[in-house]
Image: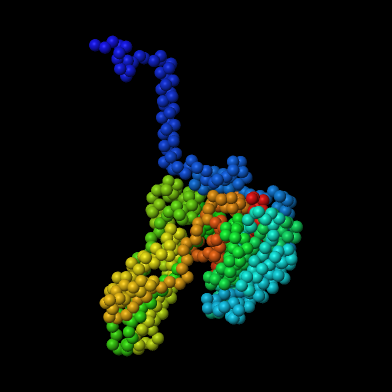
Amino acid sequence: MQSSKELPDFLNYQAEPPAQSKRRRRCIRFTLISIVIFLVYLIHYGLDGFSSARDWIPGSELAPAGGERCPQQAPLEPRHRSNLTDTNRKLILEDATYRHQSVKRMSGAIQVATQSFDDMGPVDKDPRWQVFAKFEAYLRETFPEVHERLEVTKVNTYGLVYTWQGKDSSLKPLFLAAHQDVVPVPQETTDRWTYPPFDGYFDGEWIWGRGAGDCKNNLIGILEAVEILVKANFEPNRTVVLGFGFDEEVGGDRGARHISAYLEKTYGRDGFAAIVDEGGLGIGPAFGDTIFALPATGEKGYVDIVVTVDVPGGHSSVPPDHTGIGVLADVIKHLESNPDSPHLTSRNPYLSYLQCAAEHSDGMTKWMRKAILLGKKLQKVANALSAESRVTQSQMQTTQAVDVIRGGVKVNALPERSEVMINYRIAVESSVDELKTKFVHLVKNKAQKYNLMLDAFGEKYGSGNVRWGTMRLSTREALNPAPVSPMTSDAYAVLAGTVKHTFGKDVVVAPTVMTGNTDTKYYWNLTRDIYRFTPVRSADKYNIHTVDERVSIGGHLEGVWFYHELIRNFDEHH
């Protein structure tokens, strides 16, 4: 038998003094509690909670405050020449004479009917473009200081690029964008307007007319801000570029596309600090009374798919079971019975908006708030939000709209060619190619059903067993979703801080995605920091693209103040 000195350590036990044992128990208890707290934190926030939401310099003025998922930038007030802040704020927002002058500028801009039409020909041949020369003359007369101080370059005849050269050529320029053109007003709707659409009528509160809210308010607001700064002898360190296309409403091919090429040639790829264009989802309450400002950091993709059915004609007295139009009707029914479903992923800026709403609003249901913050049950969240709003649903899925159908020329003649055009706005997680693959999968069986050869975007199916005709798939104006701009950059911080400075410190700034496309689709090469944001509260702008479009003068002037301070803030933060 072994002696006690030879016993294994785990049996050779000697009792600790009471005080030492008590301290050890306290230490173990504290350690266990710490581990539990760590695990709870990890489950709730994930590993992202241990990394900074932005790569800020400690103590920087641009450091965000509060919120793990949606840090909020503090209001950012320019420091250089601080007298400009008080003086020009009072001028823009409180001075009755300036208010009257701003009304005149907006009203005069609306009176120049810069309508762009889908069927317009080349710039140098279609006389309908000539109205833009009249508009450029109006701008030159209305903003004399801008045109004296800034260099103006005409791009593809009517595109306007203003360059306000900065003192420090090492700083990338700021690019402020808008478009000159407006959607047409159908003649048959003019009698439904409260005031004529191109009178620019001011009723004491609202400026009425086509373009009041999209987007002559942006364009005039930018020029008003620059005019004020020039008059105040403000000399920027950072170059400021203003770019105004003239055909955004019909795709931007003649305007923004050429402006982009000119700017890339001048400043190089990724040559800009940031671009701020029209867009976003406005400034207003959501999920209760919380006010959100929603700049769009992304745009959905776009494609028109055309389905053409070519079949033999003949007399209507001896018809087949299904004419070409009947075949298309079956195709349309099948497509509309199989829509894309809404879904939320980290690639979609709309999820970032929901995370901001979960952190900063008080009107979200408890289960939804928890699901969003934990990143769980997001499909349930997407379904619930989609059931409440078609607009919300469209931000989380690819949408389809059967918009144009043609077929037949005479009631007693079978249609030889029938055609349908379907518009798709592609979810940010998807692509044109992915959509085309899904489309072929959906319609392939219909071609087989009616014994048609299928020419699917150049790839043929069923060509060896054709007895009746052809179904052809083609695309028009295909555009992939835009690259998502960061909400973790200094450029976004300056934008967000300026919003809070000009619209209120309690405004929650959150990214979102646009379901439509702006001129920025041509500007992807110029910078990764592209933000689409119209600085007008939702309650101050109504009816864009339709009858009684209007903007309040108070809302417009807030936009002028925003551009004024945005230019100064970008000038100070390098």
Q: Position of residue 155 (x, y in %)?
A: 63, 70
Q: Is residue 111 visible?
A: no
Q: Is residue 564 left or right of residue 72?
A: right
Viewer-closest of 2 and 254: 2
Viewer-closest of 296 and 523: 523
Q: Which residue is pictured at 72% across the width and 56% down the height?
A: 235
Q: Is residue 511 visible?
A: yes
Quarter of the view holding residue 544 = bottom right
Q: Which residue is pictured at 69% across the width and 60% down the height?
A: 165
Viewer-closest of 120 and 537: 120
Q: Position of residue 115 (x, y in %)?
A: 58, 75
Q: Position of residue 201 (x, y in %)?
A: 64, 71
Quarter of the view holding residue 5 = top left
Residue extending farthest left: 1
Q: Which residue is pictured at 59% across the width and 53% down the height?
A: 491
Q: Quadrant of the N terminus?
A: top left
Q: Is residue 451 left or right of residue 439?
A: left
In the rendered image of this protein, does residue 156 appear above or below residue 394?
A: below
Q: Which residue is pictured at 37% across the width and 87% down the height?
A: 411
